[in-house]
Image (tube, rainbow, N blue to C red):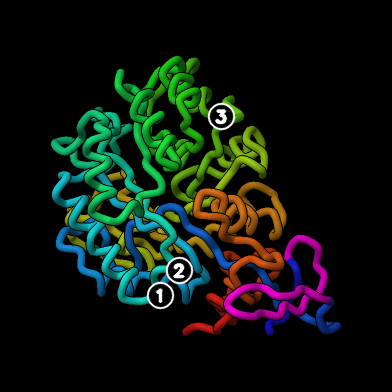
Amino acid sequence: MITGRDPATGRSLTVTVADGRIAAIEDGPAGETAWLSAGLVDLQVNGFAGHDLNGGGLVPETVARLASVLRQDGVTSFLPTLITASEASITAALSAITAARAADPLVAHAIPAVHVEGPHISPEDGPRGAHPRDQVRPPDLAEFDRWQEACGGLVGLVTLSPHDDGAPDYIRGLAARGVHVAIGHTDASPAQIAAAVDAGARLSTHLGNGIAPMLPRHPNPIWSQLAEDRLTASFIADGHHLPAEVFRAMLRAKGLDRAVLVSDAAALAGLPPGLYDQPVGGRVELTADGRLGLAGTPLLAGAARPLKQDVALAIGMAGISLGGALRLASANPGRFAGGRGLLAVGAPADLIRFRWVPGDRDLAIDTVMALGEERP
């Protein structure tokens, strides 16, 4: 049993759990001050607290430690995210994630699927971001099927750029296999974006980032994705990737139903400020305000805030409620992660109890429950 206030209504709740699921939701004790929410769901995690999914040589122990540190920060479900690399590197990493899940049921529960971001993205500087250009390649269903063979069908989300002529057929193939497809790291035309959506693409990956620094006034890939009601957009609300007014305008265009917060956390997220040398990005600087950039330049080198901080920052950036911000980091991303992130009878008992008052730039986590058990 766990108690707390519902962020959407302010009502005090008592949640009873049984067999790892929510068995009942009833009125809670008067005077409750802590908040209670479904656990956070992060669709885009490259690493955290020094645990790197993309540094090469991934082993199952790294995946297990990553799941543990994320859970301590309130993330009860996440998609390990593998970026553009050789096919051998991608399949080796997928095998390591699969082994980690097989070794620990709690890790298996925390990782409902894997997100492969690339390698079928724009090769151009700007939209390519920090992805290695020499590994960017056209979409290939045969390669995708080899990924799935390496991990028992665990890849559940793929980010690509639909600029390639073969993208629509590839997207149709993935959709037929039950895989979510996102548009990202792209310089595609409006017609190519429309064709991708017609073929089954349903997400935009970190909209407003992974794109050329200078765009035509119109048309451009941002307008095309904002205007497409079939696309849910993910956003990095860390205060660095999008200015507050841009995030606010994009969120208003999409509406709370079609928006998701992602951390896009790099391995350096959660570490002390300083200069670091990274396999991807080289010499980078992490500052005290959570900005991760290429040292000596104005360019970002990834994201360094946990999702719980992005939730708190999104409230002020977009002028939304605590309940609205949590929805963007639980139920909405949960739709793309097997139905996670729900505070409802019958849902997995993945819950967080936390403290927050208006103006706070973080959620202070008191308790994390995964599958009905309090977890360290």
Nearest to N terminus: mark 3 or mark 2: 2
Magenta span includes 25: yes
The residue under label 1 is which amino acid type?
Pro
For residue 61, what is the image quadrant? bottom left
- Amino acid carrying mark 2 in the image: His
Q: CA distance from mark 1 to mark 3?
A: 38 Å
Q: Which residue is mark 1?
A: 105
The amino acid type found where label 3 is placed reads Leu
| Mark 1 burial class by Cα count in 10 Å: few <14, some 14-19, many 20+ | few
Can you identify the residue that label 3 sits on?
226
Residue 169 vertical placement versus 120 (above, below):
above
- At horizontal 65% and vertical 75% (from top left) the residue drawn is 355
x and y, in percent, of residue 276 in the image: 22, 63
Give percent across and percent down for residue 336: 51, 49
Q: Earlier in the sequence, mark 1 or mark 3?
A: 1
Quarter assignment of residue 288: bottom left
Q: Nearer the viewer, mark 1 or mark 3?
A: 1
List x then y, in percent, for residue 234: 51, 44
Which numbered tag is attached to residue 41? none
Q: Badges 3 and 2: C-beta atoms under 8 Å apart?
A: no
Image coordinates of residue 139 in percent, x first then y, are 26, 31
